Image (spheres, rainbow, N blue to C red):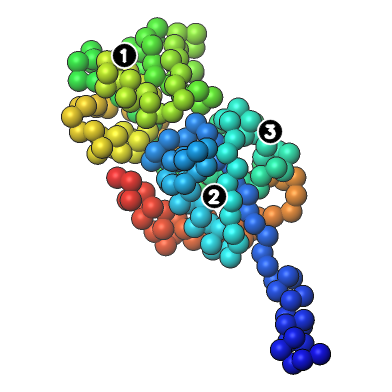
Amino acid sequence: MRPAALLLACALPWQAHAAEPTLRFIAPLNHAMPFGGFEQGRLTTGIVKDISDNLAARLGRPIEYLSVPPRRVSQVLAAGEADGVCYVARDWIDGDFHWSPAVLEHAGVVVAHPQAPPVGSLQGLAGQRLGTVYAYRYPQLELALGQRFVRDDAPSMLINLRKLAAHRMNYALTEQITLEYHNKLHPGDGLRVVLHTARYRTHCAFTRAHELPLERLDQAVRDMVRDGSVERILARYR
């Protein structure tokens, strides 16, 4: 055997052993910018992709995204068809998952167009049609309004904000960063916050269906938050 061929033969088993397996992350299809932008059904940009890419890079592993309808996220993750999903809260999905340390803190808000009547409390929204996102859960509103929580579901938060700007409804539920992103692109809409609903944290959730380096994943999340990487990602979309 020629020396070069011998070296290659020796290197290949080591390379195969050293190659890190790909992480498969869920991209829920009800995400919209700034959290997720899709092209032909594939996640291509947004906060969720940037955070997940950063996480995978810290582990030295390639990453791919599995686009999943929102109501199947729990099922796909529990079955081990995907390794993880980022930007989820504990009361958004059902199942026995490993939860990372908190990644993002959010401010939930009620948004209105300029001519919408003022609202002094959540009770003032009882019986009113509210812009919501299909398959999203709103525990604060469900608790406060019960049967008088009237949802008007849309495929994404940004579609709701466009409906709001067109005065097709008076109020919509969203997050502060989503409103900021919309107002940056469409300052003439004049959309404004009329109420804050709650502050909450989101995490990455990982399947228990097969072995993952959970301690390393958790440490990578802590490092992302501590070294300012998460804030730098958010700043790109503000």
The image shows residue 173 at horizontal and vertical percentages of 38, 24
Q: Disc 3 on helix, strand or loop? A: helix
Q: Is residue 225 left or right of residue 207?
A: left
Q: Nearer the viewer, residue 231 or 49?
A: 49
On the image, numbered disc 2 is attached to which residue? 101
Mark 1 or mark 2: which is in front? 1
Left or right of 141, for residue 172: left
Residue 171: x and y, percent? 32, 18
| Extreme residue toward the bottom, this view | 3
Identify the mark nearer the N-term, 1 or 3: 3
Dot 2 and dot 3 residues touching (CB under 8 Å): no
Numbered circle sitting on residue 75: 3
The residue lying at 32 percent from left, 24 percent from top is 162
Answer above or below: position of 95 versus 4.
above
Q: Residue at 34% x, 39% y: name it.
A: 177
Tell me the element at label 1: loop
Question: Are the residues at dot 1 and dot 2 in contact (C-beta closer than 8 Å)?
Answer: no
Distance from Cα at disc 1 to Cα at disc 2: 39 Å
Kindly indicate the quadrant of the structure image that contains residue 124: top left
